Image (spheres, rainbow, N blue to C red):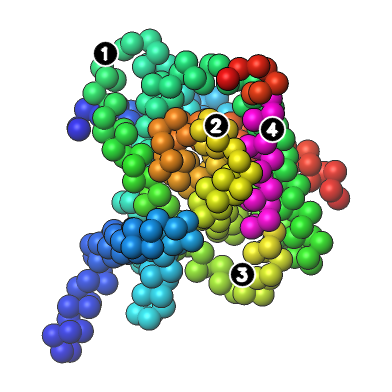
């Protein structure tokens, strides 16, 4: 075994390599995003995911091996969700004032998310397992996976749809809301959280803290709304 | 820093335990968020140091989705086979959801006569 193989054998057995690669790929994504004048299409998460998938392919590394390293980053999603309580607390006066518009927007948005995804995919000929897995795609991953399992979808496929929705949402929200002339930061953030869960929330925090706060509430509320609505609406569609 | 991490993980842990014990349809971290919010509202001193580190963590929220995003590769076969229906449904549905949610929010907020 040559020295290069020896190094590779060492690296492929520790979580260090893919943990470092995850952070590095994100740094590259963030760098390209800045160089591209922060254009939404140059989404750092999208770029990082593309780089990492290409690397894993090129080195013949299975996802499971990758995840042994990347799980340390993935794990922080839990505490980060808990951390959403802080901006929620700091902006509580604004939040209390906007309760009625939030509930109305949640009901309309959550139902649109489910019906438009399932309706379109069915019309375009996707199979029934794909439809079921797609129905809860706007909710945050743990809720979406649980709902998917309950209605006969594939939880891991749902996780893929949830992430894809998040990336699409992160790319779309700013240009779309500008085109619709929505200037209220509360509505901008809330819609990003309802439509695109945590990744929408991340892009709302890039707008400002008020938008991020409302996105965090949108994310939490749509998790609950999706869990309630998907089984009901999918019954109607059949 | 360590105090903040302890508070965040403690709330998450309490949330996970509560979700399972009570059979709630909410993920542990979301319950943990509600718990931390309640503690902040109740002006519980212990949780005060959580503020700044929490905001630091949220600045990098999008990074935390990268490992799950790489998981897309596990479904390469199906994604390739049904690329068009899946891509169109996800893009259009996400756009519709953002638009409907934002427009209804604006309509109702204006209707209430605020701002």
Rounded to the nearest angstrom, the CA distance separating label 2 from label 1 is: 34 Å
The disc label shown at residue A27, or none? none
Q: Chain of mark 4?
A: B
Rounded to the nearest angstrom, the CA distance separating label 3 from label 2 is: 36 Å
Residue B81 rendering spot, x and y as whole percentages: 66, 75
The disc label shown at residue B104, or none? 4
Tag 3 residue: B79
Tag 2 residue: A184
Q: Chain of mark 2?
A: A
Work out whether residue A211 or residue A201 is closer to the camera in this orientation and state it: A211
Q: Earlier in the sequence, mark 4 or mark 3?
A: 3
Residue extending farthest to the bottom is A2
Tag 1 residue: B45
Task: Report the residue at 55% width, 51% height from top.
Answer: A175
Residue B4 seen in this snapshot: yes
Residue A71 rendering spot, x and y as whole percentages: 35, 54
């Amino acid at each position: 075994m040559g020295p290069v193989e020896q190094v590779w054998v060492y690296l492929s057995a520790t979580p260090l390599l893919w943990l470092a690669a995850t952070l590095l790929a994100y740094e590259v994504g963030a760098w390209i995003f800045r160089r591209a004048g922060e254009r939404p299409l140059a989404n750092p998460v999208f770029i990082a995911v593309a780089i990492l998938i290409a690397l894993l392919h090129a080195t013949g590394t299975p996802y499971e091996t990758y995840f042994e390293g990347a799980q340390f980053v993935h794990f922080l999603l839990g505490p980060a969700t808990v951390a959403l309580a802080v901006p929620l607390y700091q902006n509580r006066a604004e939040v209390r004032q906007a309760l009625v518009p939030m509930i109305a927007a949640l009901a309309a948005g959550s139902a649109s998310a489910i019906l438009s995804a399932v309706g379109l995919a069915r019309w375009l000929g996707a199979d029934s397992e794909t439809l079921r897995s797609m129905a809860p795609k706007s909710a945050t991953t743990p809720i979406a996976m649980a709902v998917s399992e309950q209605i006969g979808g594939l939880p891991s496929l749902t996780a893929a749809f949830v992430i894809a929705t998040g990336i699409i949402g992160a790319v779309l929200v700013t240009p779309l809301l500008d085109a619709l002339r929505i200037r209220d930061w509360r509505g901008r953030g809330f819609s990003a959280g309802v439509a695109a869960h945590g990744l929408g929330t991340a892009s709302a925090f890039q707008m400002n803290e008020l938008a991020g706060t409302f996105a965090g509430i949108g994310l939490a509320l749509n998790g609950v709304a999706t869990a309630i609505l998907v089984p009901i609406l999918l019954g109607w569609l059949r | 820093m360590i105090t903040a991490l302890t508070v965040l993980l403690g709330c998450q842990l309490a949330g996970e335990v509560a979700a399972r014990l009570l059979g709630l349809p909410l993920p542990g971290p979301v319950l943990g968020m509600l718990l931390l919010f309640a503690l902040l509202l109740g002006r519980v001193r212990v949780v005060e140091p959580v503020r700044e580190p929490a905001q630091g963590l949220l600045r990098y929220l999008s990074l935390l989705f990268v490992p799950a995003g790489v998981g897309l590769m596990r479904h390469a076969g199906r994604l390739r086979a049904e690329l068009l229906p899946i891509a169109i449904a996800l893009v259009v549905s996400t756009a519709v959801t953002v638009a409907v949610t934002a427009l209804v929010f604006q309509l109702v907020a204006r209707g209430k006569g605020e701002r």
